[in-house]
Image: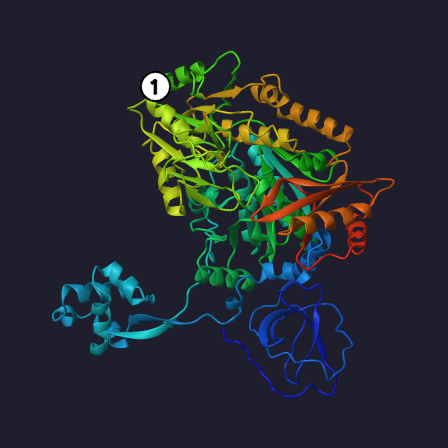
Amino acid sequence: MQTLFQETESPVPEDGTRAAVLVPYPVDKAYSYAVPAGLDVASGDYVTVPLGSREVPGVVWDSAPDTVSAKKIKSVIAKFDVPPMPVAHRRFLDWVAHYNMAPLGSVMKMSLPVPGALEPPKAAKGYVLSDTARAEMGKEKFFQNLSPQRRKVLDVLSDGLSRRASEIADAAGCTPAVVKGLLKYNLIKEVDIYTAAPCRNPDLSRDGPPLSEAQGIAAQKISDHVKSNAYHASLLDGVTGAGKTEVYFEGVAAALKNNKQVLILLPEIALSNAFLARFKERFGCAPALWHSALSPHKRKNTWRGVATGETKVIVGARSALFLPFADLGLIIVDEEHDPAYKQEDGVIYNARDMAVVRAHLGKIPVSLVSATPALETMANVWDGRYEHLHLPDRHGAARLPDMHVINMKEDKPARQHFIAPSLHAALEKNLAAEEQSLLFLNRRGYAPLTICRTCGHRIECPRCTAWLVEHRKSNRLHCHHCGYSLSFPKACPSCDDHESLSACGPGVERILEEVKEYFPDARIVVLASDTAGTQDDLRTILNDIREHKYDIIIGTQIIAKGHHFPRLTLVGVVDADLGLGGGDLRASERTFQLLHQVAGRAGREELPGHVYLQTFVPGNKVMIALAGHDRDEFLEIEAAEREAAHMPPFSRLAGIIVSGKDEKLVMDTAAALGRCAPQGEGLLTLGPAEAPIYRLRGNYRRRLLVRADKKIDLQKVIAQWLTQVKVPSTIRIYTDIDPQSFL
């Protein structure tokens, strides 16, 4: 494919033909450009236009061009040979911008993150057998004068496929120079080759594993939704280990049989390793991946494959939702409850909610998948907006683990230790049985706080309102918010007393130290985002765990979901109370979800599982619900409390964050917003107040929170409010519709 490059330097045409072009910058509308004679453009086309002194890519939008003077208007420069952005996707971007109160151009930029993908792919040099070689290969004396390496090269190329010299050399066990040396004998020839789009031809002849009755019913319903070619939203709700993935794979197969594309969203790319193996086993090829760690070349190739329709299945993080699918037929949102679906910077949005909107606008089905659905999702099920597909039991012979609540006020660990005697005994028993154990603590590093025993000084980040976390492995103190770090001080920065600094509280490194003390011969590994620095590191560790090369795993939330370890039968939660503090609206719900997911790692096959929850509040509703495997009762209690407080999902919230490096200016701007804040029937504005993390990356932050009845047009109210205050150029105001975090 070649760029049309219908370039022109001709003047604006006399017929006045114009197009509205949206550029990927923080602008709220499309700009008018003249369309040169002979250049045919329509809505959705990708074009190059002048913007100031630059030439930038853009998309022809549906809005009417401005009536700007012909003397001031500039011309479209070129049109790219890429299928136009589909109508449903353009409507989706409009909707996302309006709902989340974000500049339309910034939203469109998320659909055009690799402008280079608009250019035709560049050819690389490849090699195939020459006509001479093909004609002579069947003759016995053909090979007599060839070295074994050259014979192997020709044998590799005998399948007729073109390859790069390095690929041929790897297959033939020689160097690329040997391959290229055959050119002078006219035995091979050069050809142009292009990188193929990923996931072009999934194998639809393969059958999935046998499904249980409940799985079969759910799979059939998702498949029927796909075949209907209409919008339908469902919740695939099943306990951990119920086989939800195999169920929605049947929906994926149904979409592919209809020659449709499929988007599968995962909250974290760490979940993709085990998932990719399952997908490849089911469909005979790997899906295309989309996440921030992809190389530029892969991003270009994947984006183009999605836009042309060649790429059939994308597995990606939240940003994959904004790829311009040529013919999307199904969206799956796995682990739909996960807070990682909320983007907190740039364009602020919730990918789970936006996925439902994308499905509705595209008239396609969407299935949300979770063992611990978000309360908002369950409210939509209760109200009949989503169909409920329920898998009540684990697949096969596996059953849910036995739950044990440890009251830390009674079953106390030794001084400066954090593992209760009963959990210690369970670990000892599990080791003797040659089964695996997991100790979960959602806190990286060695200790979350370093304090001076002499003067009480606590070492904080100079850029954030946060304590620095000690990491023994690097002998440094780190801020987990901005990345600032320093070497561990030899003396207190405040009183200069030596050897007075003390670690307070445990992180996973400190638990590792304690476990090594108890079990010096055990094979132990720590799995956290800073111990598995790359995808290859993570993949290696996870494979080693599956192959039982470790007896005890100590991990953060990176190991909480999506993993299946056959011999893992014991889970110990070191601090089950960790997420309950802070007054967050969703603190109880998120703690329940995380601990339920962690508990679900135990006993996923024939061996029975046990889960130990260490808590100082055994009577808390979260601990009671977890101990009784009673998720539904927990959700009903949580819903009743939210309804009584008039909080989501029974109302709407919007956060307004005022941020800047000048503290007084931030305070004055926030105070001015507070004085004219919307109040009235069905409307309540709280604040301004310091954000819990008052200083973040050097910026001071104050927050206001608007609560509104669901019938009120919250975006309109906020838009009118924000126009009443003149905001200094050094101050930024962020609007967070449906906030998930209040930090």
Q: Is residue 158 left or right of residue 228?
A: left
Q: Is residue 267 above or below residue 428?
A: below
Dot 1 alpha-carbon crowd within 10 angstroms: few under 14, some 14 to 19, many 20 or more? few
Q: Which x, y percent locates residue 517?
A: 33, 22
Q: Which x, y percent locates residue 126?
A: 33, 70
Q: Is residue 571 above or below residue 473?
A: above
Residue at the extreme right of the image, as rendered: 681
Camera-nearest residue between 562 and 496: 496
Please, what secondary structure does the residue beneath circle 1 have? loop
Camera-nearest residue between 627 and 494: 494
Mark 1 lies on residue: 433
Residue 566 visible in the current orientation: no
Q: Is residue 300 above or below residue 11?
A: above
Q: Quadrant of the C terminus?
A: top right
Camera-nearest residue between 392 and 602: 602
Q: Which x, y percent locates residue 659?
A: 65, 50
